[in-house]
Amino acid sequence: MTIDNTYIADQFDLLSKLMDIHGENSFKSKTYSVAAFNIEKMPQSLATTPASELFSIKGIGDSVGKKILEMVQQDGRLQVLEEYIEKTPPGVIEMLRIKGIGPKKIATIWKEMGIETIGELLYACNENRLMLYKGFGEKTQKNVQESIEFYMRSQGSHLYADTETYALTVNKTLAEQFPGNLFAITGAFRRQLEIIDQLAWVTTVPVQDLQSFFEANQFSTVESADTILTVKGQENIPLKFYHANNEVFYKVLFTTSCSEDFAQAWQALSGWDTNATYTSEEAIFTTTNIPYIAPALREKGAVLAANRAPGTLIQPEDIRAIIHSHSDWSDGSNTIEEMANAAINKGYEYLVISDHSKSAFYAKGLSEERIKEQHYYIDELNKKLAPFRIFKSIECDILNDGTLDYSNAILSTFDLVIASVHSNLKMTEDKAMMRVMNAIQNPYTTILGHMTGRLLLSRPGYPLDHKTIIDTCAAQEVVVELNAHPRRLDIDWRWIDYALEKNVLLSVDPDAHSIEGYDDCRYGVLAAQKGGLTPDRNLSSFSLAAFEAFLAKRKATKGI
C-alpha cells in the first residue's frame, strides 16, 4: 500500500463524510474535510516528513497530525475511521459515490427512509418516495435516479431489462452491416435469465471482420481467437461472439443456449450426434425424440427427464388484467382514473388498485378513513367506466408478528388483499417464516406479495423455507405473486415448478407505481416462462368473469 498524500487526504475525506452521516459534531467533521482539501495540494510528502516537522506545517493541527502519524505507523490504518466503517452499512458508504447526494441527504435516506443500498434507493426513486422527505424535490429525485443508473451500468452485472434495448440494437446493426450472414442471440439473454453479465451471439461472420468493425466504432477487444471474439463498448457490457459456419451454426446455437446442468443431462441422451448437420434447433430435438424445449426452459436437467411436451408457456398477450398497482392515493404517480383509462387503452379487462396500508407511512399508506373515501371514489368510477371494473384492494403490510395492518373488519371491505413484508427485512429464517406463515393463514390474505422482498443486484431476500411457504399457500388457497418489476421478479422462477406441482396459483403482477409500470408485466412473463408457467395457472390471465368467480368462491370457502 502506498501511503501518499492522496491516500491520506482520501481517508480524512471519508472520515469527515461518515461523521456527517452519523450526525457527529459538524465542527470536527469540517476539520477533517478541510484537512483533506489542504493535504491533497501539499507539495511535500507527509508520510516521509519527520514527526518533529509535521505539526509545524500550516493546516496540520494536533488532531490531524496525530492521525497522519497513526496512518504512517499502522500501514494506512486509522482506528477511528475503521470504527465508523464498522457501524455503517456498506451500501450506505457506497452511496457517497452517487453524484447529487451528500452526507446529510444520505443520513436522511438511511436513518429516516430505512434504505441501506443503492439498489433500494433506486427502487425508492421509482416509487416516488424521496419526494416525501425534506430536501428531496422532484428534480433532486430524478437527478439521483439518473446518477444511480449511470453508476450501476459501470458495475459489471445488469438486469435483463437494462440490457434488452442494447442487445436488440446491436443485433439489428450487425444484421444490416453484414447482410447475408446469420446472427442469433444466445447465452444467458436468450435463456431470459434475470441477471446478465455478458451478451452473446452465434454468427457466420469471421472473427477478424467483426473485430475490425467494432474497433472502428471505438470498442475495445477483450478476447480474440479463431472462433471467439469478445469486445466491450462504453455501455460496459461484454459482447461475445461465437463464429460458426453454416454446417454447425444451429448446433453451436443450441449448445450455447443451455445451462451447464441442462447440457450435462443432454449429453447423457442417446441419439445426439455431435457430427451431424442440423438445419434448425427443432431438428436437434427431433433426433432425440424429445419435444422441442424453449431456451427459457433449458436450465434444469430434470426438464429432459420428464420427456414430455411442456404446456403452452404464458405469453405477454395472455395478461388480461393489472393486479397490484399503486395510485396517487399512496406513492403512485397517477390518479386511479388515469390508471384505469390506461388499462382500458391497453386492452385490459380490469384493474386491481392496491395502495399501501397505514404502516407504510413513508408511502402515504391509507388510514381507515381514507380507505372509505377511496372505496366511494372507486364505486363512482366503476359506474362511469363499466363494463371495465376496478377492484378494491390493498397492499397490506405484514407486521412484525405476522398480523396484517388492519383489523378483520377493515380487511373485509376489500375485494382482495395482497399481503407483503416491507419493514424490518433483516430477519433470521425463523423470524421470517413466522411472519409470512402467520400472514398466509389469515383468511383475508388473497395474494402473497413479493415473497422474499429481494431487490436484484441490491438486496438479498430474507431467508425462507420456500417449500413450506408454498405448501401452506396451497393449503390456504393463497395465490403467490410473481412481482414483475425487473428489480424484483419475486417469487424466483426456480420455485415456480414446485408451486405448480402443488397446484398453487401464481399471479404475474407489475407492482405499478405509474402507467408506464404496466409494461413491466412483460418481464414478469419472461421470468414465469422459465418456471414453466401456463396462462391457466396465472391469476392475471383470468377473464373478468373468471376473476370475479374466483374471488366469490374463495370468500365462500373462507366464510368471509
Image (spheres, helix red, strand yellow):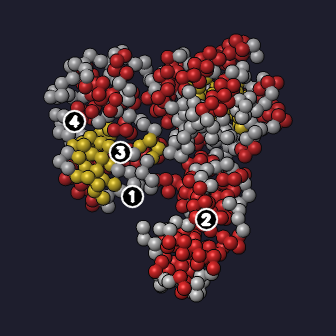
Residue 509 visible in rendering: no
Q: Quadrant of residue 513?
A: top right
| Alpha-carbon span between mark 1 and mark 3 | 14 Å
The CA distance from mark 3 to mark 4 is: 18 Å
Q: Earlier in the sequence, mark 2 or mark 3?
A: 2
Q: Position of residue 328 (x, y in %)?
A: 72, 43
- Does dot 4 land on a helix, a strand or a loop? helix
Label at residue 234: 1
Q: Which residue occupies 27% across, 45% down? A: 241
Disc sitting over residue 199 in the figure: 3
- Front residue of 455/183: it is 455
- Give amino acid for label 1: Gln
Label 1 to label 4, Cα distance in Å?
A: 29 Å
Give the left or right position of residue 399, taking residue 253 as reference: right
Q: Which mark is residue 80?
A: 2
In what element is the residue under mark 2? helix
Q: Farthest residue in the right direction? A: 369
| Circle 4: residue type | Phe
Cα separation, mark 4 vs mark 2, equals 60 Å
Disc 2 packing (10 Å; few <14; some 14–19; many ≥20): few
**Residue at left 25%, top 20%?**
269
Report which residue position mark 4 lands on: 249
Q: In this view of the protein, which residue sits in the foreground, 436 or 167? A: 436
Q: Nearer the viewer, mark 3 or mark 4?
A: 3
Indicate the position of residue 453 as horizontal and vertical percent values: 60, 37
Q: Is residue 292 left or right of residue 418?
A: left
Residue 88 in the image: state x and y as whole percent: 61, 55
Q: Are marks 2 and 1 in contact (CB under 8 Å)?
A: no
Q: Is disc 1 placed on a helix, strand or loop?
A: loop
Can you tell which quarter of the image residue 56 is in? bottom right
Which residue sits at x=57%, y=22%? 468
The residue type indicated by label 3 comes to Leu
